Amino acid sequence: MVSIETLDNISKDDLESILKVWESSVRATHTFLKEEDIISLIPQVKEGVNYVSKFLCVRDEKGIIKAFMGVENDKIEMLFIDGNKRGKGIGKKLISYAVEVLNIKYVDVNEQNMQAVGFYKHMGFDAFKRSELDDGGNPFPILHMKLL
């Protein structure tokens, strides 16, 4: 069973786990990124966890974070699953929780991350707008998706 935990304070160990999950997930799904792109994004991930009103995680039996989601207002700002835990229903459980409990309606996703685009479509989201650049001004188009 997947247990979702809300983190109000992120410890140093949790942040280390979060960064490992993020990197594992990005390497499994963001095949369009170069190594230098991944490295350059790490500071943004460290900062980003502090700029969402709700930060949720899923831990393994040893208490190590294996998935996390950040939510601000009615939008999922980040969702990452450890590359070795993908396809086991964790993302679906997190999205369901976000929709049913947190009332989220929106998510942005890299257009080139076809796995994520397909996942969000499967979960009931559809693109309503497209941006040529990501939030950092990089040439990675973003699909703005809304729950139907």
Image: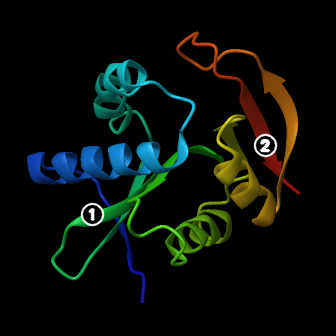
How many numbered markers are drawn? Answer: 2
Q: Residue furthest top?
A: 137
Q: Tell me if residue 71 can be seen.
A: no
Q: Tell me if residue 60 can be seen.
A: yes
Kind of residue at disc 1: Ile
Give SS at disc 1: strand
Question: Of residues 65 and 4, which is closer to you in this image?
Answer: 65
Give SS at disc 2: strand
> What residue appears at the point 66 percent right and 39 percent down from the top-left corner?
109
Separation of marks 2 and 1 at Cα, in angstroms: 27 Å
Looking at marks 2 and 1 on the same chain, the residue that comes earlier in the sequence is marked by 1
Residue bearing the label numbered 2: 145
Residue 92 at x, y percent in the picture: 61, 71
Residue 5 vs residue 94: left or right? Answer: left
2 and 1 marks in contact (CB < 8 Å): no
Q: Quadrant of residue 91?
A: bottom right
Kind of residue at disc 2: Met
Residue 3 at x, y percent in the picture: 39, 80
Residue 41 at x, y percent in the picture: 38, 24
Q: Quadrant of residue 7?
A: bottom left
Q: Quadrant of the C terminus?
A: bottom right
Residue bearing the label numbered 1: 65
Residue 51 vs residue 100: left or right? Answer: left
Question: Of residues 55 and 93, which is closer to you in this image?
Answer: 93
Q: Quadrant of the N terminus?
A: bottom left
> What residue appears at the point 36 percent right and 50 percent down from the top-left corner?
24
> What residue appears at the point 20 percent right and 46 percent down from the top-left corner?
15
Against 93, residue 25 (above or below) is above
> What residue appears at the point 57 percent right and 31 percent down from the top-left corner?
32
For residue 116, the mark is none
* Pointer 1 local density, CA inside 10 Å: few below 14, some 14–19, many at least 20: many
Residue 137 vs residue 69: left or right? Answer: right
